[in-house]
């Protein structure tokens, strides 16, 4: 079948523009606790030269050493040093990483033999809600997705050109992905499966395989040297990454159900587009599944390659004790590529039209859903809340409040009730409290009042030991109450 020539450059630029129009508006709105978690560690690196969470009380291991991979705090420290402080500034590197995913997906499609598939995949990824969310959140998934996809592209190019140099660059990109988050190891395992598929049992004799492995390992050496440099870091490392070993099967199933319900768009306490528990993204997920099914039928080699690029990541998530659906952004490039490659594999115009209409539906509905998310974000003006908090709480104050507001008061001594008791905070001289925020009142969003004890202890304390000096009402963050300790 003859395919008409298309101006791929113009189409990729159009996909990039579509992403920009969705993600840039209100970029400083709806700042959440995870973002302050990472920002507090970046702040510690910038101002103290220590990789630790400065918003946690000294009783917490992460206040001594945050033993997550070092690239994320290094990126945030560099961002703060060059751009300053604020939600939009801290989010900018992740936003740029997600924007770069669009041409990367196109190039991977081209490397797999189909520029047309690359274009289709680029448009799908430009509106994919997981990418939209990653580009507007200070978390490492955007960077893992970017450098993971770069490594995949370089692997395919090194295979086609039999280039050891490109294999070295593939290992370099893999190492960077792993230095942002442990989810990078899922992509590393995927590259390993691709190498096994290419070389079989003789893989250990191949120069390109060794170039990838040794370069990736070399990129991880500085992190492990840093860990070994202090027993406190090793202890914090074992505490952080040993949590998964204590999980029961029932717990794993419970958290994975939450992850996949979020992914197919069923409303929850943390976020809902509509008040009914309908799977708003089910048609998108089924589109991806259909793409893989068509490839299994029509192009088995491509099917196995793309399957190898998602399975290791999905299988390692249950051990991470984090049910976020945001992890899916790491494998999104390969999900959309399955659809793009499936389109080119179909030979009958009728089936191509049907799949094209399905893709168009996915693009329109996800762009619409993203627009609704933006509209709802208007009620979460973090900069406005920050200005009001700073007008009430004086310079030099020692503050105890939700981790969410660390960035607003980054130049104060700030301790988060998320990790540390009020009694310990008072011993350290805390003289201002921020209470009644949405998480303290309603919980973390998983259906239970997981902060009830903290809330009741704080409310009992302020009844006799503090004066209410101000309110900062906000429809998203809560009717914040600011107290000064007597």
Image: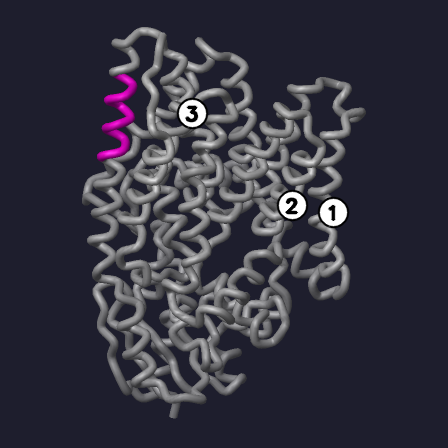
Q: Nearer the viewer, mark 3 or mark 1?
A: 3
Asked if residue 57 is among those painted magenta in the image, a careful observer would answer no
Q: How many marks?
A: 3
Give the labeled residue for mark 1. 218
Side of 329 relative to 179 (left or right): left
Query: Is residue 246 visible to us here?
Result: no
SS of the residue at dot 3?
helix
Side of 403 relative to 424 (left or right): left
Residue 103 versus residue 205 in the image, above or below: below
Q: 114 and 123: which one is in front? A: 114
SS of the residue at dot 1?
helix
- Residue segment shown in magenta: 354-364
SS of the residue at dot 2?
helix
Residue in the image at 22% along x and 47% along y: 371
User: Measured from the top left, where is residue 108 in percent x and y?
Assistant: 49, 30
Side of 134 relative to 193 (left or right): left
Give the labeled residue for mark 3. 115
């Amino acid at each position: 079948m003859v395919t008409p020539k298309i101006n791929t450059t113009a189409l990729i630029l159009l996909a990039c523009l579509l992403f920009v129009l969705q993600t840039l508006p209100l970029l400083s709105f709806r700042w959440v606790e995870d973002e302050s978690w990472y920002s507090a560690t970046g702040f510690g690196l910038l101002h103290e030269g220590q990789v630790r969470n400065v918003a946690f009380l000294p009783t917490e291991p992460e206040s001594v050493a945050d033993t997550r991979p070092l690239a994320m705090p290094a990126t945030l420290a560099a961002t703060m040093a060059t751009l300053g402080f604020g939600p939009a500034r801290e989010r900018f590197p992740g936003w740029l990483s997600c924007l770069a995913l669009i041409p990367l997906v196109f190039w991977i499609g081209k490397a797999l033999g189909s520029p047309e598939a690359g274009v289709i995949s680029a448009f799908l990824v430009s509106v994919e809600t997981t990418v939209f969310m990653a580009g507007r959140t200070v978390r490492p998934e955007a960077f893992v997705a970017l450098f993971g996809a770069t490594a995949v592209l370089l692997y395919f190019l090194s295979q086609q050109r039999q280039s050891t140099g490109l294999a070295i660059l593939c290992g370099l990109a893999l190492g960077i992905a792993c230095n942002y988050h442990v989810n990078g190891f899922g992509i590393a395992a995927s590259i390993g499966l691709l190498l096994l598929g290419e070389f079989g049992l003789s893989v250990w004799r191949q120069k390109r395989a060794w170039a990838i492995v040794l370069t990736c390992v070399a990129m991880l050496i500085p992190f492990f040297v840093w860990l070994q440099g202090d027993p406190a870091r090793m202890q914090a490392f074992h505490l952080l990454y040993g949590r998964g070993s204590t999980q029961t099967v029932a717990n794993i199933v419970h958290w994975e159900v939450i992850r996949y319900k979020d992914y197919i768009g069923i409303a929850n306490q943390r976020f809902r587009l509509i008040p009914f528990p309908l799977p708003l993204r089910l048609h998108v997920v089924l589109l991806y599944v259909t793409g893989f099914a068509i490839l299994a039928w029509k192009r088995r080699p491509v099917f196995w390659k793309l399957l190898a690029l998602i399975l290791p990541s999905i299988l390692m998530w249950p051990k991470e004790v984090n049910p976020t659906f945001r992890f899916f952004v790491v494998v999104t490039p390969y999900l959309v590529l399955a659809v793009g490659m499936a389109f080119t594999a179909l030979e009958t115009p009728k089936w191509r039209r049907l799949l094209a209409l399905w893709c168009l539906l996915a693009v329109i509905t996800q762009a619409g859903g993203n627009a609704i998310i933006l509209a709802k974000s208007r009620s979460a003006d973090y900069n406005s809340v920050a200005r009001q908090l700073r007008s009430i709480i004086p310079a030099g104050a020692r503050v105890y409040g939700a981790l969410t507001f660390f960035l607003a008061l980054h130049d104060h001594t700030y301790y988060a009730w998320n990790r540390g008791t009020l009694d310990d905070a008072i011993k350290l001289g805390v003289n201002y409290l921020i209470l009644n925020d949405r998480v303290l009142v309603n919980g973390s969003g998983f259906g239970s009042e997981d902060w009830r004890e903290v809330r009741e202890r704080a409310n009992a304390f302020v009844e006799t030991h503090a004066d209410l000096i101000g309110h900062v009402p906000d429809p998203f963050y809560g009717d914040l109450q600011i107290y000064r300790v007597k």
